[in-house]
Image (cartoon, rainbow, N blue to C red):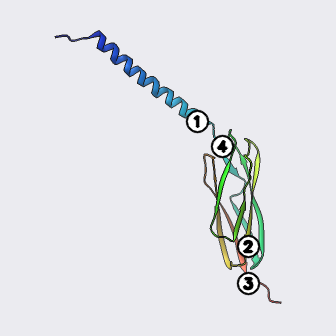
Amino acid sequence: MLLFNPHYSYIWITTNMKRYIFIIILVVLCGFQSVAQAVIKFEKSTQHLGFVRQGDTLNFQYEFTNTGNQPLIITDTKVECGCTVVEKPADPILPGKQGVIRVIFHTNSAIDRQDRTVTILSNATNSPSVMRFKCVVLKPKKD
């Protein structure tokens, strides 16, 4: 009976070493991938628009900065209803640069307190970003 087979031991070490090397390379590559990302940082996440009259059209914007180290691409925006229109940047926002998301809110069908959200989808690590705007829509003035 042979208790130690040098050939088998060599095969076991070689096979396990290949596995360990593969795992180490995988961990290192994943670490580099997580370091190279875009990050979106908004100056204000909530807009307080005050008191407005029904029928008014409100134009406002959300300013942001790409604080990551890769270009930021805003892929989509989502709103709660058709009364809100969002205009997103078409081009990527380079690291350290600023961008603007413009919003138009039509108050024709709104009345009383409004607390709406705009969801911004991007390649940023902190995506999706949810922005809010609030206002109180009063009845139109009678002539």
Labels 1 and 4: the sequence-earlier one: 1
Report helix, strand or loop for mark 2: strand
Labels 4 and 3: the sequence-earlier one: 4
Using a 10 Å C-alpha cutoff, classify the residue at mark 1 as few (fewer than 14 neighbours), some (14 to 19) or many (20 or more): few
Q: Which of 120 and 132 is in front in this view?
A: 120
The span from disc 1 to disc 2 (Cα, nearest Å) is 42 Å
Q: Nearer the viewer, mark 2 or mark 3?
A: 2
Q: Which amino acid does label 1 sit on?
A: Gln
Report helix, strand or loop for mark 3: loop
Report helix, strand or loop for mark 4: loop
Q: Relative to residue 47, is residue 98 depicted above or below?
A: above
Labels 1 and 2: the sequence-earlier one: 1
Residue 6: quadrant of the picture: top left
The residue pinned by badge 3 equals 139
Q: Which of 106 and 114 is in front in this view?
A: 106
The residue pinned by badge 1 equals 33
The residue pinned by badge 2 equals 106
Report helix, strand or loop for mark 1: helix
Q: Which percent across, then down, holds residue 51?
A: 75, 75
Image point (79%, 86%), residue name: 141
Labels 3 and 1: the sequence-earlier one: 1
Figure quadrant of the C terminus: bottom right
The span from disc 3 to disc 1 (Cα, nearest Å) is 53 Å
Q: Which amino acid does label 4 sit on?
A: Ala
The residue pinned by badge 4 equals 38
Q: Which percent across, then down, holds residue 55?
A: 76, 78
Labels 2 and 4: the sequence-earlier one: 4
Label pair 2/3, CB-CB below 8 angstroms: no
Q: Which amino acid does label 3 sit on?
A: Lys
As drawn, the residue found furthest toward the left would be 1
Q: Relative to residue 105, is residue 142 depicted above or below?
A: below
